[in-house]
Structures are given as structure tokens and as C-alpha cells.
Image (tube, rainbow, N blue to C red):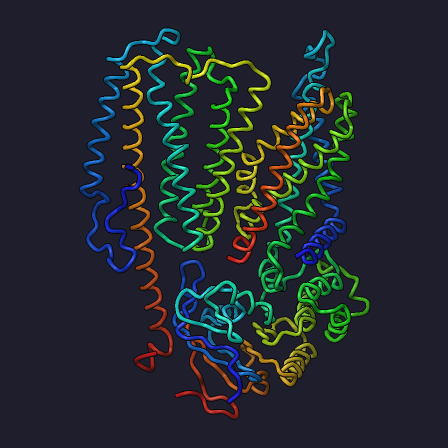
Amino acid sequence: MSKPVVRLRGVVSLIGRFPALAGADFAVSEGEVVLLQGPNGAGKSTLLRVCAGLASVHNGTGEVFGFDLTTRSGQREVRRRVGLLSHATALYDELTVEDNVRFWAAAANADVGAADAAMDRLGVGGRLRSIRVAGLSAGQRRRTSLAVLVARRPMLWLLDEPHAGLDAEGRDLIDELVHQAVGQGATAIVASHELDRVDSLATRTVHVVGGQAMEVRGPGQAGAG
Amino acid sequence: MTTEISPEPASKTTTMTDAVTSTGSKVTRVLGALSLVSIALLLAFGLLVSPPEIAQGDSVRLFYIHVPSAIVCLYIAFSITLVGSIIYLRNQSTFWDLMAGAAAEVGVVFLGFTLVTGMLWGKPTWGTYWTWDPRLTSTAVSFVLYLGYLAVRRLDMDPVARSKRAAILGIISFANLIIIRYSVAWWRSLHQGQTLDPRDTQLDNTMLFSFVLGVLALTMTFAWLVIHRFRIAWLEHQLEAQQLELAIAERTSQGPTGLAHGGA
Amino acid sequence: MIEHARLIAAKDLKIEWSSRVLTAQVIPFGVLVLVLFGFGIPPDRRVLASEGGASRSLLEQASPGLFWLAVLFSLLLALNRSFAVEAADGNLDALRLAGFDPAGVFLGKSGAIVCELLVLELVVGTGAFLLYGPPLHDALQLCAVVVTTTLAMSFAGTLYGALGAGLRLRDTLVPLLVLPVLAPVLLAATRATESALFGPSSEGWAWVGFLGAFALLYLGAGILSFGSLLEES
């Protein structure tokens, strides 16, 4: 079996005083594309935030790329290596598309070329580049923050409902990007309600219910019993 | 020192707070009784036994509670907050986090008391409640400073992050306390001659005794209040921990392990 | 660290430049405060200057303090603005994810505030000279006062601004925290400016030293504590 990327054991993670994750066991190996499934409020987003090193681990143990999620230095190392696309787009309204993508890319030590290529790839290059983010549509904002993610070239992609708010072409583009990244050695965890779409993409499906994760039978692979 | 009295075997480990009906204990009851007796004694000595002072007359009697309460909050209370904050940042000790908060809370009350008695003393002495006396002025600013600290402790946010922010603030606030006191003193000393200073007061033996009694009485009262305040905070903390356990158990029962299998 | 600080500062200044909040709102606010002081303090009232028999208008005598008060109030607006842009739309999380050195973020954000304050002080200061008409005894000392005070205010302000970062109560909490802390700075800046304007200079330099020490203290405190402040949510 290939290298483990994510390994969570009995992880409890809190939002305020609410245990969004209540003892989640979850493991992902290199090169996998794992689909997270589950009702609203099941803990999918928190699971992704824990894997990103953003949400703190209240109880249990967790490692991403071998870095300990329960320590701050470990979290810091993890954060550098992952890309998270969440509901928030994390863009500065007053800056242009180009400024935004270049700022976040430079923060991650990516060069200007990578930022420019990512903008073109996501269809926010050209005329849109010099438009302020405040003037973009929701779908264009989403594409811009995807461009940031692509420019950063993360080793672990964490996508929270990536298809929401995108047109058909944009949805295809996401699938293509994930495919390509995984082909280059990255790993991806995708939370989505769009089963038919992600089924073709995912190597495995994990059900998240009540703050816990459970394997289900996925395409091409038997789930844990 | 009285302030070092720790609560019941600081049960950080497992003892749950099942049958707690009060925050009192033998130690606090004795301490409370001693505080009350010493305050009664202080009233007797301060108001009846001790003579009026030559220059100030009867207003010197305020001095027996004003200066002790200033000493208690500025030297004891906020030092505990400082030490508690430092220890909390080092090892995330809930005990010291709550202790820092309890000391600051009671300290602010004493600081307010200091301010009011200081102004009351100013009226007969200087003819006005407020004279921009350096000590009084810096006390007023410090009062707001620690109100800010308490405001951060009450914020509705992630408890761990809040404790950390409060601890950082507890440390910086102490530095600010010193900066404020010295800068204000410097400012006033440059522009005014010496004003009448409570510390210049001429004391005979009864007066000195009253003063020492005041320090003792207020220190004990402070310790008594802090211990109770701390225990309330500690119980709240325990309760929250219990509620969290329940919440986790409840959430677990909704999940796959709770529905299908037995264990993890 | 320096590279990260440069990135953050450039980003913040670019946001200010393109939104024009500083030039269109904060600076006019500062000037307006100066004018309003003139309503509160009768402009015709004259006081005896300390040395000799010459008299000054009360406003002129109070001009150093009034100027720094106007700057202080404007600083609160600038701080609020600086952390409002980070609070929007998950940007705080993105900053954490981006792998920024926390000390670099502190230096970058306070650096941007320094630049904004210097611009503001130039305009509001010119306004104060025009409106209140004080003399200028020692220009070099005045520059030293402005620089040290700006650094002191920016470092302390940024540290306390981060304490309120990401909180709903930020708007009211940060002024409550910052104002008592900056009270000594206001005091020192006012005294030092008084001696730079009216002379003699000797006393002013001591206050400049105090301001410099204060700035250094908060520079250190910010660099040390920004990690804890930013990385917890």
C-alpha cells in the first residue's frame, strides 16, 4: 500500500462548545481521491479543516504528511502543504483578480508565472485579471480562489463543495484539475453532494455521520467492514 | 502569604463536582471570619481609637482603607494575574488561567474602591474631587486597562483561544500598569511642585497600627473573595467539561459506531 | 520574515490606495476633529505663556495635545479598517494557511499603518499649523517626535487590533483596549511636541526617548505574541 497522507484516530474537534467531530477515524493514502458524503451538519467541513491544520484537535491523535496535528508547529507545517477550497473564497474585495492571486501565490513561494498560468487555466485571465474582486460574480470569485489553489500546487487538495455555484464547464474543469493534480502525485479529499459527478472521480467514498467517518463500498475498492 | 492559599486539593484530575452546594470550605470559613473581625477592628481603630492627624484632621482616617486597597490591587492582585498568565502560556494550566481571571476581577473592584476613596480624600484635602494627582490619574487609566482585560475574558469565542489572548493581555497589561504610573508621575513632577501626598502623613503608633491593620484586613478579604471567585470559575469549568462529554456522547450515538457497531 | 512583511504591507497599502478610505474618509475625519476642537475651546480665549508676559491663544497653547488626539482617533479608524479586511470572507484562515511568518504579518500590518499615519499626520499637522497657528521652535525635534510616536502607536495598535481580530465585538473592544495603553504615548507626544513648538528643547528629548522605548517594547511584544494571536481562531 502507498504512503499514508492523513491518519486521524478518535479525533474530537470543537466549534465553540459543539463537538463537530466526535471521535472520527479517517485515513487517506497518497494518490487517493476520497469523496466525503453525509448530511448537512455531519462534520464534513470540520473534517476538512482538521486535515488542513486549521481546526484544532481537542481529543484523539491526527497526522497529515507525518506532522502531528495536535501541536502548533505540526499544524503550521501541514498548513503549508495543503490547499483548502471552502465556502469562503478568501479574497480581498478591493484588489483585482491578478493582485489577489499573485499575493496568495507569493505568500506560498509560488512564482508569478504559476499565478498567471493558473488564472488563464481557470478562465479568469485576460480581461478579468484587472477587475476588482468586488465586481465579480459568485462563480467568478470561486474560479479566482481555485486559481489561488492551483497556483500554490498543494500536495493535499481539500475541496468543500467545489462544484457549488459553478457552470457546467467549470464543474468539468474542477474534475480535470483534480485528475491532473493526482496524476502528478497529489492527494484529494472532496466533500460533495453531487454523487454522480464525483463517483467517476473518487477512488473511495467515506460516509460522515454524527461527527464520525465510516467507509462505504466505493467504486473499484471494497470499503472497510 | 495569604494569597497563596490554594483551593481544595486542586483537583485537576478526575474528582467531579457531584455534590457541590457551596464554594466554601474550612479554610475560607476561617478566612472569612478573620476578614470580618479584622474589618470590624479596623473600623473601631480607624474611626474611634486613632486620633485625627495634625495637618489633615479627620480625613486621614480614609487613608487606612485607601492605601491598603491600592496595595492589594496594584501589588497583589495584578501580580497574580501576571504570574497566572505567564504560567498559563507555558503549560496551558486551567488552574492558573482561572486564577489570573479571578484575581483581576476582584482586583478591579479594589481598584475602583481605591479610586473612590482617593477622590473622597481629595475633597477635604485639596478642596476638589479631582486634581490630576499623578497617582489618582494613573489609577483611573489602569482601571480602564483592566476593564479591557476582563472584557476579553468574557468574549464569546473558542475558550482556548480566548484564554490565550487573555493571558497575553494579562502580561502586557502589567507592563502597561508600570508605564502608565511612571509616565504620569514624571509628567506631573515636571510641571508641579510636590502636592500634599498621603505618604507624607505623620503617623503616631495608633495610626500606624490602624494602617497595618487595614493592610491585613483588606488582604484577607481579597484572598477570601478570590478563592470563592476562583472556585466558582473552576466549577463552571468542570460543568462545561461534563456538558462537553455529554455532547460528544450524544453526537457519537448519532454516528455509525453508535448505530451499527458496538465499539470504535 | 522581512519578505512576508513586505508582501503584507504592500497588500494593505494597495487596498487602501484602491479603496481610498484613508484619503476620502480617515484624513477628512482627522481634520474635522481639529475644527471641532475649535468649537469646544473658544478660539479667542488667551492664556499667559509660561515665560515672560507674552500671551497665546488657548487653542495655540493646547495645539500639541489636540493634534495628537486627532491622530489617535484617526488611528482607531485605520486599525479597524486594517483588521476588517482580514476578517472578511475567511481571509484570516487563508493567512494561516498561506504559511506566513506571524512576526512578518505583524511587521507588515504595522508597517502599513505607519505609512498611513505618516500621510495623515502630514495633512492633519499642516491643518493644525494653519488652524491653531503655533510657532515652531525645533523642527528636527518635531520630526523625531512624529516618527517615534507613529511607531509607538502603530506597533501597540496593531498588537491590540489583532487581539480583537475575527471577533464580532471588535469595533468596540479595540478602542477600549488601545486607549488606556496609548494614554502614556499621548502624554509623552504632547509634552515633546510642546517643547518642539514652544521650546526649550531639552525636556522634549527625554520624552522622545520614552516614546522610542515604548515603540521598541511593543515591537518586541508584537513579534513574540503574534503567533499565538493569529494562529488560534
Q: Position of residue A112 (x, y in %)?
A: 76, 68
Q: Position of residue B49 (x, y in %)?
A: 24, 13
Is A18 placed left or right of B8 in the picture? right
Is C194 placed left or right of A156 in the picture? right
Is A216 placed left or right of A177 in the picture? left
- The image quadrant of residue A171 is bottom right
Q: Nearer the viewer, residue A55 or B85?
A: B85
Q: Residue at x 43, y 13 (%)?
A: B123
Residue ranking furthest to the bottom: A220
Q: Position of residue A197 (x, y in %)?
A: 59, 83
Q: Nearer the viewer, residue B245 or C198?
A: C198
| Rendered-image quadrant of the N terminus of chain B | top left
How many labels sit on residues? 0
- The image quadrant of residue B255 is bottom left
Q: Residue at x 39, y 49 (%)?
A: B97
Q: Position of residue A17 (x, y in %)?
A: 40, 59
Q: Residue at x 29, y 46 (%)?
A: B231
Asked if B163 appears above or below A103 in the picture, the reply is above
Is C185 placed left or right of A20 in the picture? right
Q: Residue at x 33, y 47 (%)?
A: B233
Asked if C218 appears above or below C18 in the picture, the reply is above
| Rendered-image quadrant of the C terminus of chain B | bottom left
Q: Nearer the viewer, residue A199 or C15?
A: C15
- The image quadrant of residue C218 is top right
Asked if C34 appears above or below A56 in the picture, the reply is above
